[in-house]
Image: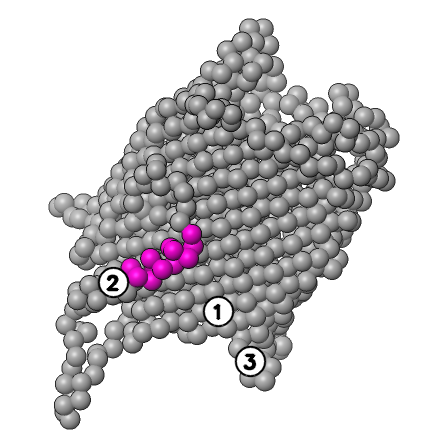
Amino acid sequence: MSQRLQPQHRPARALRSARPAAQLAAPFPLRRSALNPLSPQVLLGLTIGAMLVAAPLANAQTSSAAEPAATADNAVTLAPITVQEKAAQVAAPYAGGQVTTGGRVGLLGDKDFMETPFSTIGYTEKYIEDRQAQNITDVIAATDPTVFSNGVSGAWAENYSIRGFSSSSTDMTFGGLYGMAPYYRTSPEMFERIEVLKGPSALLNGMPPGGSVGGAVNLVPKRAGNDPLTRFTTTYMSDSQFGGHLDMGRRFGDRQQLGVRFNGVYRDGDGSIQDQQKKVQLASLALDWRGDRARLSADFYASDDRVNGVNRGISLSPGLPIPKVPKGDTLLNPDWSTVRTKDKAAILRGEYDLNDQVMAYAAFGMNKTDYQYNGAMSALVLNTAGDFRTTMGQLAFDVKKQSGEVGIKGRTQTGAVGHQWAINATHYAHKQDDYGRRSVPGADWTTNLYNPVWGPVADIVRPHIMHTEVRLASYGIADTLSMAQDRVQLTLGVRRQQVVSDSYDINTGARTSRYDESATSPAAALLVKASDNLSLYANYIEGLSQGATAPMTAANAGEVFAPYKSKQKEMGLKLDLGDFAHTVSVFEITRPSSYTDPVTNVYSFGGEQRNRGIEWSFFGNAMHGLRLMGGVAYTAPKLTQTAGGVNQGKLATGTPKWQGKLGAEWDVPGVQGLALNANATAVSRQYISADNSLWAAGRTTYDLGARYSTKVADKPVTLRASVLNATNKSYWGMPQLSSLALGAPRTFALSASVDF
């Protein structure tokens, strides 16, 4: 891949290497018998041992530039060697430091955003810190007009949609691997980049376990930089939630081959919702070793996320209008309700340059999640006075996951046509045990939206109710053909995916059902660099989701359906003005949907939802001292096929047609280190009924903040202050599994970072 000419006034972009976009990492095939995770201590020992064994082998490949050189007095010195993290060069900060110049594009590897034939964006570690983000949604939904968040605080999981389709937090990838990120909510302190690829991505990433089709989120773990780092950050968030974050990084060796990065986080206290407390604990360790041809890394983390007084949604009885919005700090779930998610994982990754043109890679990870919930399962508004009845439930599950990929990437030349090709295989497996009950006898409670009063804590009884196992295996191949001095790039690829799902009797252990289906997903994308600053692109790509099983109430109860495909067609342009960039795209995504025929009572996949939209986004330095991010998006999520034509042509629920977002940061002249910032988010109505007769009103919210960087006792210090929802606007949003939920009230956030 040839380099684009870079403006000389932006050196950060000029540092990108000419490493082929195909070079990124991946894992070994997994054996089904290996589903019992090794302990992190064992994996840590294996990793360090592997690094020590690999070091002399890889150093044997060192070029003559690294051979000892005899000086005039016969002293022997080593010639200097610069070991570069090539992938990091592609993802260097763009002007303004808030987003990256590129990132990982699944199977295709690392690509500059101007050479990526899809809509992508990557957020930097600096932007994550300056946002004072406490989860991934805080980052990806702040300024991107294609990402919608209902604004709910302290729910049982993160909740966002991309291009009008709900995206499951369980489908985030950790360094490209499914199932390795925390299950329901992820605190972002251990990541140096958060990348969003919009649209389906079956070819690029394989089938997501949760079936998301609107987009894919990839989390890139931190690595030790060349300079030592010891940074401590204290945090406060209203009403009285305090915390601390320690970030340490060091490199060791005569050429800084071995890197160690540690992040530890603790937050605890009352949130901005009445009677709601949040507690987060996170510890992560990242190791990496960089040789001349080989690169190894290992990531370990343990997280514990807990909410007491869980924010949950409500539904309406037939015929009721949308109720008046209560105060934004009202808790619509018992104050004794609780949700707790504990995650731990270990991920190993390795790359080896077979020569200057070909790289092999492998990655493997294991994750364990324990989840517990006690509180309202559903809430139904009974009348216009706001009385509502809650049904209490108790759920728990533990799930063990493995994920891996293995592959090879390279580049070749055939005449005037260059090839960047990639072949890989992926494997994902999990075992899950579910416990609990969705209704607790005698625990249901009736209260009022505007003055909720709760009964006593329900006794916890969680019987074992289900055991399932899922395995996803796929094989993908892609080739990017470059012509006309790389100004025309055609990407072609295909992935074969197999899905195996088994259910077991919890008493006998006998298998009660099996789902074994396969599907092939092709993709094609064209990128034309009309100039050094303008790229035009178009793509066709498919998404793949696990087929559903007909419910017990249907005439064909138990029938299992094949994986279903979502299809995207997209065209767009990317304009890079040197310090400020724009992207414009139009798209159409069609996704099959299921329903039970009201006449025959047969459950089938005869429905379809079609989302059409247009997006404009921008980021970078609009002028000296002024950084802007944001855009406008229009999405029409239309139901194009429904059971018996009922509600056909209506818009899908929960998705606003319009979103507009603007984030601005201004360096105050004459006050070195002081920057003021503001965010505005405007969304149109979201329908909450399938016939479009009821909707949550649109809203506009504002965030305000400031950042001051200085030195105290010769130590770098950064102070940050933010006011989220500065006008304290109360509004309804549409959450998962119900119709309405309260958005977060005005919230204050403060932090102070010190580098030692």
Residue sitting at 28 percent across and 55 percent down?
Answer: 351
Image coordinates of residue 63 in percent, x first then y, are: 16, 69
Hey, which residue is sitting farthest top in the picture?
600
Residue where numbered disc 3 is placed: 715
Examine the rendered structure and indicate whether residue 595 appears above or below residue 104.
Answer: above
- Mark 1 lies on a secondary structure that is strand
Reading the chain from its start, which is encountered first: label 3 or label 2? 2
Q: CA distance from mark 3 to mark 1?
A: 15 Å
Between disc 2 and disc 1, the foreground one is 2
- Mark 3 lies on a secondary structure that is strand
10 Å crowding of disc 3: few (<14), some (14-19), many (20+): few
Quarter residue 32 falls in: top left
C-beta proximity under 8 Å, tags 2 and 1: no
The disc at residue 248 is 1
**Main SS of residues in magenta:** helix
Examine the rendered structure and indicate whether residue 24 appears above or below residue 83.
Answer: above
Examine the rendered structure and indicate whether residue 562 appears above or below residue 122.
Answer: above
